[in-house]
Image (cartoon, rainbow, N blue to C red):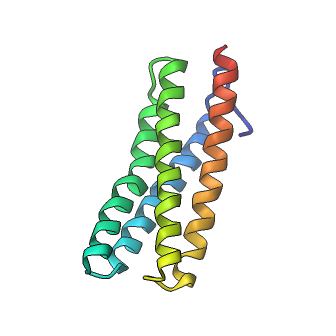
Amino acid sequence: MENQSETGRPSQSRADELEERLIDFAVRIIKLSSRLPKTPAGKHIAGQILRCGTSAAPNYGEGRGAESTADFVHKLGIVLKELNETSIWLRIIERSEILRRELLTDIIEENSELCKIIGSSLRTARMRKK
């Protein structure tokens, strides 16, 4: 990620932008989960994707307030894990065809982009930690 400080953390404005994207992503996950069928499978998937898909933003917020680079790296690792889990649930929804594909395309793409951004920031922070 460009515009990072010496600690490997994103600059303030980039961090603000990323936090807003993660919040917007969480809102999209909430809306998507409400469209899932009220069947046992739909309810299960809704609960799972709500948990992981909405946790990236608050975990990123915690990372921004980290007390050390190690703490920042740890929190960012959690963000990436949650986004990766969200990706799996989105693929399960897509393959099971319980929602129309056009409802999923943009959110899958955003999830992928967020994973790349967080992964890049995490790699940078880990290198600078050494």
Residue 70 shows in the view? yes
Residue 114: x percent and y percent?
60, 52
Q: State the residue at coordinates (74%, 39%).
A: 2
Reply above or below: 6 against 49.
Answer: above
Residue 10 shows in the view? no
Instruction: Specify the quadrant that holds the N terminus.
Output: top right
> To which quarter of the image does residue 36 belong?
bottom left
Residue 115: x percent and y percent?
61, 50
Residue 106 lies left or right of residue 67; in this view the side is right
Residue 36 versus residue 17: which sits nearer the camera? 36
Residue 15: x percent and y percent?
58, 40
For this orientation, the residue located farthest to the top is: 130
Residue 129 lies left or right of residue 104; in this view the side is right
For this orientation, the residue located farthest to the right is: 2
Q: State the residue at coordinates (44%, 48%).
A: 57
Please give the count of numbered marks on the rendered protein.
0
Q: State the residue at coordinates (35%, 67%).
A: 45
Q: State the residue at coordinates (53%, 76%).
A: 95
Residue 124 versus residue 44: which sits nearer the camera? 44
> To which quarter of the image does residue 28 belong?
bottom left
Residue 45 lies left or right of residue 118; in this view the side is left
Instruction: Specify the quadrant that holds the C terminus.
Output: top right
Residue 12: x percent and y percent?
59, 36
Residue 23 lies left or right of residue 16; in this view the side is left
